[in-house]
Image (spheres, rainbow, N blue to C red):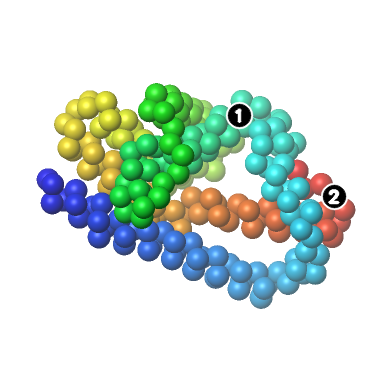
Amino acid sequence: MDGLYVFLTGPALWITFIIFIGGLILRLAYLFGLSRERDRVFYNHMSFSWAMKSILHWLIPWGSVSLRLQPVFSLVFFVFHVCLLGVPLFLLAHNMLWEEAFGFGLWSLPDVWADILTVILIGCAIFLFVRRLVRLEVRILTTLWDYTVLVLTTLPFVTGFLAYHQQGPYEVMLLLHVVFAEILLIVIPFSKLGHIILFFFTRAFIGFEMGGRRGARPW
């Protein structure tokens, strides 16, 4: 068990980061080349101010008309993403690993706050999952893979929470936590989860088209 943990947090983790970062770079390069070939008109109306306005209005709850039409979903969606990014980045245990590996770490959340945010994230994930099941207009657009991605996104938090509180076999939960986290990172560049990067380019391009070209608000 110890040998497996060392492998998962050593060579396997480095391979995961290489695939994660390399996959995102390759996907961005491919999409950029494709856009230069097929959508050159976008580059005729590039506007930094419209791009930033488009991005910022979609980064805050109720910042766009469509999000204001779904206020509860907008709030849950926003909180889900804040927890999704905040807990892994500012968890004390993770920062200790960064310190050990690279000699530096980020500011760390108190453990009690990390626990609270983890529980909130799991609650938000359940809400989003149920919403896909009960809202007809969402369900007809949802595939099995969409459900799988949502579950996969949540599993590292569930297993990490259980491992920290020693619920179930500790070593098994810890290994599952690492495995699910690495699988998630590998999947991100090749799935809809790539929007963690692509979102900013998509909103910027829509800002160019709607604002820079037509003078209309893209939010």
* Residue type beneath disc 1: Leu
Q: Does residue 102 lie above or below 178 as drawn?
A: below
Crowd tier of the residue under label 2, counting other residues whose Cα lies within 10 Å: few below 14, some 14–19, many 20 or above: few
Residue annotated with mark 2? 216
- Say if 81 sits above or below 120 in the image: below
Please indicate whether residue 161 sits to the left or right of residue 3 in the image.
right
Q: Residue sitting at 22 percent across and 43 percent down?
A: 175
* Residue 167 location (% of width, % of height): 22, 25
Q: CA distance from mark 1 to mark 2?
A: 25 Å
Q: Residue at x 69, y 48 (%)?
A: 55
Q: Position of residue 39 (x, y in %)?
A: 71, 69
Residue 106 placement: quadrant: top left
Outermost residue toward the bottom? 37
Q: Amino acid at mark 2?
A: Ala
Q: Which residue is mark 1?
A: 75
For the C terminus, the image quarter is top right
* SS of the residue under disc 2: loop
Neighbourhood count class around disc 1 (C-alpha, 10 Å): few under 14, some 14–19, many 20 upward: some
- Marked residue nearer the N-terminal end (1 or 2): 1
Percent of width and height locating residue 183: 33, 51
Q: Secondary structure at mark 1?
A: helix
Q: State left or right for residue 46 relative to residue 10.
A: right
State which quadrant residue 96 falls in: top left
Depicted 146 relative to depicted 67: above or below? below
Write the residue at 28% across / 45% down. Answer: 178
Q: Residue at x 61, y 25 (%)?
A: 72
- Judge whether residue 144 can be spotted in this image: no
Task: From the viewer's perspective, tell me whether residue 31 is left or right of residue 12.
Answer: right
Name the quarter where the N terminus is drawn: top left
